Amino acid sequence: MPTKKAAKAAEPKKDLMNSAAKPQPAAAKKAKAKPAKPKSKKLAKTPKSETVEVAELLSSKVVYQGPLFRVLHDKLLEPGGKPSERDVIRHNGSVVILAIDSSKSKKNPWIVIERQYRHAANQFLWELPAGKLDPGEDALAGAQRELAEETGYSAKKWKPLVEYYASPGFLGESMKVFTAEGLVAGDAHPEDDEEIEFRLVKLSDVLKMIEKGAIKDGKTLTSVLLYARTHRGKSKK
């Protein structure tokens, strides 16, 4: 039995022209007028592991060495091959502690914040407890030490929140933020050059201080706002 294609091929051209001139049923017109659906293109898959490109260091000279950091003058080839010279502050890194007391309210816990004078900012600042790491010191151990030194508190539950670079254009200091919960009060023993006033403030009030511009410290803004966002999501579940 001939197929439809074969049957159409056997028809004379005149008949095809005549049939084309005849009015077609509405359903047939619609079928012919229906546009073809565009084929969707699949997005390229993101590679699981990306190659980390680093600069080629040509030379490095210490131009300043202090008790907290050192300043280096580096000559390098950037990852794209462009030659460059950079002055960089190298630092052992710091830890930040978001100490949380949720014993009275889990939705609106109390946060430990400090007030101390910062000469570089030429003013008193509200901040989270924080401090520098000693060479080779474990970040969690450093966070536990700093919280005890500055506030006297210890904590039963510790969890990393985020790590960031405050000013990577010239500062190599990494800041690791931890949350500390299950607070246990103790005696503070700050360093000789530290005069710290600390208090517990409700999370909602800390957020109001941020909105009003009363908190200008970067590590506190980063840590509190991130925690508030994740905490709000958990409290809704």
Image (spheres, helix red, strand yellow):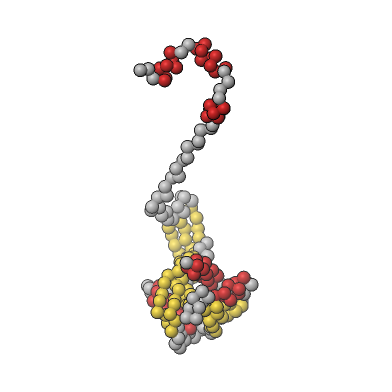
| Residue 111 image position (x, y, % from top left) | 51, 78
Residue 212, position as x, y percentages in the image: 64, 72
Picture residue at 50% right of the left edge, 58% below the top: 85
Of 7 and 67, which appears nearest the observer?
7
Report the front residue among 5 and 225.
5
What's the residue at 55%, 78% (across, down)? 202
Q: Closest to the observer: 107 or 212?
A: 107
**Picture coordinates of residue 15 (x, y %)?**
51, 12
Q: Examine the rendered structure and indicate whether residue 125 appears above or below residue 163.
A: below
Report which quarter residue 139 is drawn in: bottom left
| Residue at 53% in and 75% down | 108
Q: Left or right: 211 with respect to 97? A: right
Residue 134: in sight, yes or no? no
Q: Is residue 64 above or below residue 85?
A: below
Question: Where 187 falls versus 45 (above or below)?
Answer: below
Q: Residue at x 45, y 64 (%)?
A: 61
Quadrant, the N terminus: top left
Residue 70 image offset from top left, x and y in percent = 47, 70
How many numbered marks appear?
A: 0
Which of 154 and 69 lies nearest the eye of the viewer? 154
Q: Is residue 11 visible?
A: yes
- Which residue is outermost to the left? 1
Q: Quadrant of residue 213?
A: bottom right
100, above or below 33, in the image: below
